[in-house]
Image (spheres, helix red, strand yellow):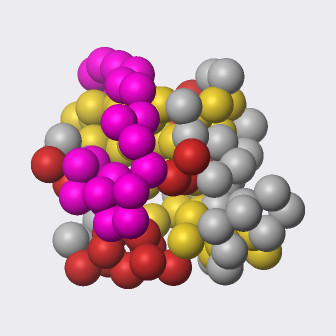
Amino acid sequence: MKISVACDNGMISNHFGHCESFKIYELNQNQVLKSETIPNPGHRRGFLPVFLHEKGVDVIIACGMGRGAIDIFNDKGIEVIVGASGSPDEAIQLYLQGSLKSTGSVCHEHLHQGQCEG
């Protein structure tokens, strides 16, 4: 299983599409085997969900995300967790414990500064 977390400055990014990087965790039987950080290749409509799908990601964790990206992830069978904040490592542990749940924080505008609702 692979879980990707949208990050800025080592913390969960406020908005998925405009993050600096993605921290991708590879897991086996709820144990983190390794993680890597890859730069965001750029925000283009519909591109990032396909990019992460091609990387083998099964779950994406972010604070906020647009409805279009959520729909593409859902179409590809990738679980979307939005409304997360703080440390990516802590979010992974909460997810593995079953206590990290999506709040439905959907961004409705491409301004994103304060535009995401929980």
Q: Is 78 displayed left or right of 8 in the figure?
A: left
Q: Is residue 108 magenta?
A: no
Tell me if residue 30 comes above or below residue 70 in the rendering. above
Residue situated furthest right in the rendering: 114
Q: Is residue 36 magenta?
A: yes
* Image quadrant in which you'd find residue 110: bottom right
Give the residue drawn at x 81%, y 57%: 113
Give the residue drawn at x 40%, y 42%: 42
* Image quadrant in which you'd find residue 38: top left
How many dots with numbers?
Answer: 0
Q: Is 94 displayed left or right of 30 in the figure?
A: right
Q: Is residue 30 visible?
A: no
Q: Is 104 displayed left or right of 48 in the figure?
A: right
Q: Is 43 displayed left or right of 89 in the figure?
A: left
In this view of the protein, which residue sits in the foreground, 41 or 58? 41
Where does residue 97 sit, x and y in percent of width and height?
53, 49
The quarter of the rendered structure image containing the C terminus is: bottom right
In this view of the protein, which residue sits in the foreground, 99 or 61? 61
The quarter of the rendered structure image containing the N terminus is: top left
Where does residue 80 sit, x and y in percent of width and height?
45, 65
Give the residue drawn at x 33%, y 66%: 46
Q: Is residue 71 visible?
A: yes
Question: Which range is magenta?
Answer: 30-52
Where does residue 114 sit, x and y in percent of width and height?
85, 62
Give the residue drawn at x 27%, y 48%: 52
Where does residue 111 sit, x and y in percent of width and height?
72, 63
